[in-house]
Amino acid sequence: MGRIAYTGFPPDQGFASSMHSHRQYDTVAFDVRDNAAMLFFARTSASGDIDDYLLLMRADGADSADALYIEVNERQFAGHGLVREARLTPDVLTLDLCAPAAELDGATRLVLAFEGSPENRANVQAGAFRILGDCLAGGHA
């Protein structure tokens, strides 16, 4: 069985008990630039500083077609066929990776819980379809 990385809340707490924790990602932003689409998850402090983040990015262009990049608190990994399957529910995006990510201590699944505000949900939906469209399965987007 593969390792699971829960991001957005402390790894020593169970998912169910932490799903509504104050340590969830409170901000989600989606942006399209000249050569990339980016979906950014952040947990911010009361002063507005970023305490924890995850960036999903799909690069556009002939040299980088279908290349997906994931960065978690300055740890980056990338590749073609990086995500086997993605599932989106109203306040959780789950990414099943094709292979264990050494950058995340061998995790094979990323579970991204986020605050379910209308703005966050709209950004996640737009970004998930643009960045992970061919990997999305099931869910309630």
Image (cartoon, rainbow, N blue to C red):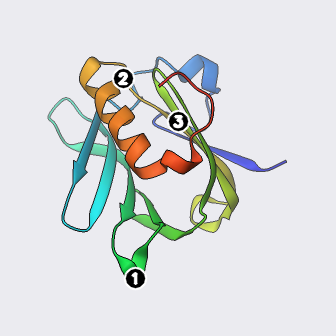
CB atoms of marks 2 and 1 within 8 Å: no
State which tag comes first along the sequence, 1 or 3.
Answer: 3
Q: Secondary structure at mark 1?
A: helix
In the rendered image of this protein, does residue 119 appear above or below residue 133?
A: above
Q: Secondary structure at mark 3?
A: loop
Point 47% across, 17% down: residue: 20
In the rendered image of this protein, does residue 49 appear above or below residue 141?
A: below
Q: Toward the viewer: 109 or 83?
A: 83
CB atoms of marks 1 and 3 within 8 Å: no
State which tag comes first along the sequence, 2 or 3.
Answer: 3
Residue indicated by mark 2: 115
Point 61% across, 64% down: residue: 81
The image shows residue 7 at horizontal and vertical percentages of 50, 41
The image shows residue 137 at horizontal and vertical percentages of 62, 36
Residue indicated by mark 3: 10
Which amino acid does the dot numbered 3 rest on?
A: Pro
Point 30% across, 28% down: residue: 122
Separation of marks 1 and 3 at Cα, in angstroms: 37 Å
Q: Residues within 10 Å of mark 2 (few under 14, many from 20)?
A: many
Which amino acid does the dot numbered 1 rest on?
A: Asp
Point 38% across, 47% down: residue: 130
Q: Residue furthest bottom?
A: 63
Q: Secondary structure at mark 2?
A: loop
Residue indicated by mark 1: 63
Of tags 1 and 3, which is closer to the observer? 1
